[in-house]
């Protein structure tokens, strides 16, 4: 009789309804990947088949759309790859990048799984570990180099150094002065003043003082070409040394004057940068496209605190779902391939965005109707078989 075929069809159709219903239920779940049912016929050598069975429930790992959230702790992968988490001493993988920063500095999702990655500066050469944002302040850094670019007025008259010795308090002993800021090893800010004295055609003497104290042992000389550009080979850029006191180390820094010119325009400072800074407390955390965790500090400095590790698999469809938007590796999926966002097969990271479910709700509703009709058709087969059996029973 055909009851077994119809029963197998009912079971298969029920599974299909479960899968479609689960897809619809998770159509708004961040990072969810829809599934589909694959059927196979059952044939045991009889003239008529023995029905159908569910061969597999196949996961669809195509990318969902990235949706902006405006929350800087939300991350979405624009391309291939999975976030790597540790949860209950187990490594799990997910496409859900809705993160929070715990009081201990861990990056966790809503289920308490902690994001893993590589320590700052190590890259993929290191072992992935749970990422933790340090709460400590950034240490101060002493200035070791100053880069400045000026225009020196070519129309001013030279100063005879023999007749007019240099004196920071005498404005007639130099042609131009400009101030900047440098930092000692304790992060204390000091005022640096550069003095320029035209000593001859296309030749300028450079002296530097910090907090009004001149380094008399060092002076530089800028030599310009006839077209007003700096002749770096003929110029000298010595290192200036000062003792700031207060327990700080001796302050030594070199000055560079790339881009400095001598034209018939007014004196002007085009740019002035130095590499020192004071200590600063951590005020925020952000992420870049390469997956770097960037700490933002009160001293207006930034520092890479770690790098998020991404994973990929030769056969993502072989991953086993653990629920909570997480998967674990299996023999079918193969071992994880670890890397950094934006490199090779790995997609880039988008901060302030999440990947929405890849479920096409319209298609799922159509599939729901088809699955329902399939179920109804199998029940009709049972009804017909029952009527045939009843007719046989009623034979006289």
Image (cartoon, grey):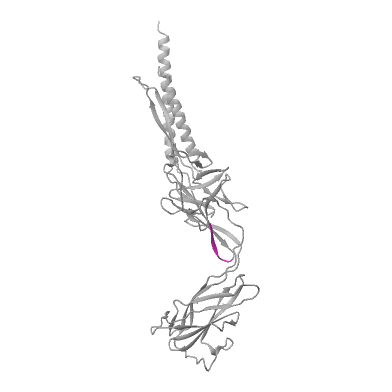
Q: Position of residue 81 (x, y in %)?
A: 45, 48
Front position in the image: 73 or 257: 257
Q: Position of residue 315 (x, y in %)?
A: 42, 41
Residue at position x 54%, y 61% in the image: 303
Relative vertical location of residue 3 with respect to residue 286 in this rendering, above or below: above
Picture quarter containing residue 185?
Answer: bottom right
Q: Position of residue 342 (x, y in %)?
A: 44, 54
Image quadrant holding the N terminus, namely: top left
Image quadrant holding the C terminus, namely: top left
- Range of residues picked out in magenta: 299-305
Total numbered labels: 0
Which residue is outermost to the right?
246
Q: Can residue 379 be seen? A: no
Residue at position x 58%, y 66% in the image: 299
Relative vertical location of residue 211 with respect to residue 361 in this rendering, above or below: below
Q: Position of residue 147 (x, y in %)?
A: 49, 74
Which residue is outermost to the left?
47
Front position in the image: 104 or 254: 254
Front position in the image: 348 or 31: 348
Residue at position x 41%, y 52% in the image: 344
């Amino acid at each position: 009789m055909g009851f077994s075929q119809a029963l197998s069809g009912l079971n298969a159709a029920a599974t299909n309804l479960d899968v479609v219903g689960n897809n619809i239920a998770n159509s708004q779940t961040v990072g969810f990947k829809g599934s589909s049912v694959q059927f196979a016929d059952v044939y045991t050598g009889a003239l008529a088949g023995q029905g159908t069975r569910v061969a597999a429930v196949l996961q669809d790992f195509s990318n969902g759309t990235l949706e902006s959230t405006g929350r800087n702790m939300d991350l979405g992968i624009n391309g291939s790859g999975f976030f790597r988490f540790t949860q209950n001493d187990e490594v799990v993988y997910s496409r859900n990048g809705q993160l929070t920063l715990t009081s201990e500095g861990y990056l966790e999702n809503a289920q308490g799984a902690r994001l893993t990655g590589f320590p700052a500066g190590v890259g993929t050469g290191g072992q992935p570990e749970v990422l933790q944002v340090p709460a400590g302040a950034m240490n101060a850094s002493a200035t070791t180099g100053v880069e400045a670019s000026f225009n020196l007025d070519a129309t001013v008259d030279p100063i005879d150094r023999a007749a007019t010795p240099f004196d920071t308090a005498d404005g007639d002993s130099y042609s131009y002065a400009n101030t900047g800021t440098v930092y000692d090893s304790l992060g204390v800010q000091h005022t640096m003043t550069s003095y320029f004295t035209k000593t001859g055609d296309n030749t300028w003497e450079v002296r530097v003082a910090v907090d009004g104290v001149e380094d008399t042992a060092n002076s530089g000389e800028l030599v310009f070409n006839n077209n007003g550009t700096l002749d770096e080979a003929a110029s000298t850029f010595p290192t200036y040394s000062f003792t700031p006191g207060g327990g700080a180390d001796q302050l030594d820094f070199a000055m560079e004057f790339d881009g400095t010119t001598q034209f018939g325009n007014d004196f002007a400072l085009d740019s002035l940068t130095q590499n020192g800074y004071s200590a600063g407390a951590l005020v925020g955390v952000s992420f870049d496209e390469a997956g770097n965790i960037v700490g933002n500090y009160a001293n207006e400095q930034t520092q890479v605190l770690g790098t998020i590790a991404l994973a990929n698999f030769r056969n993502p469809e072989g991953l086993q779902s653990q629920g909570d938007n997480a998967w674990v590796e299996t023999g079918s999926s193969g071992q994880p391939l670890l890397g950094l966002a934006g490199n090779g097969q790995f997609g880039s990271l988008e901060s302030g965005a999440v990947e929405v479910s890849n479920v096409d709700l319209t298609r799922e509703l159509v599939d729901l109707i088809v699955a329902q009709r399939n179920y109804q058709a199998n029940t009709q087969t049972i009804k017909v078989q029952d009527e045939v059996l009843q007719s046989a029973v009623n034979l006289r």
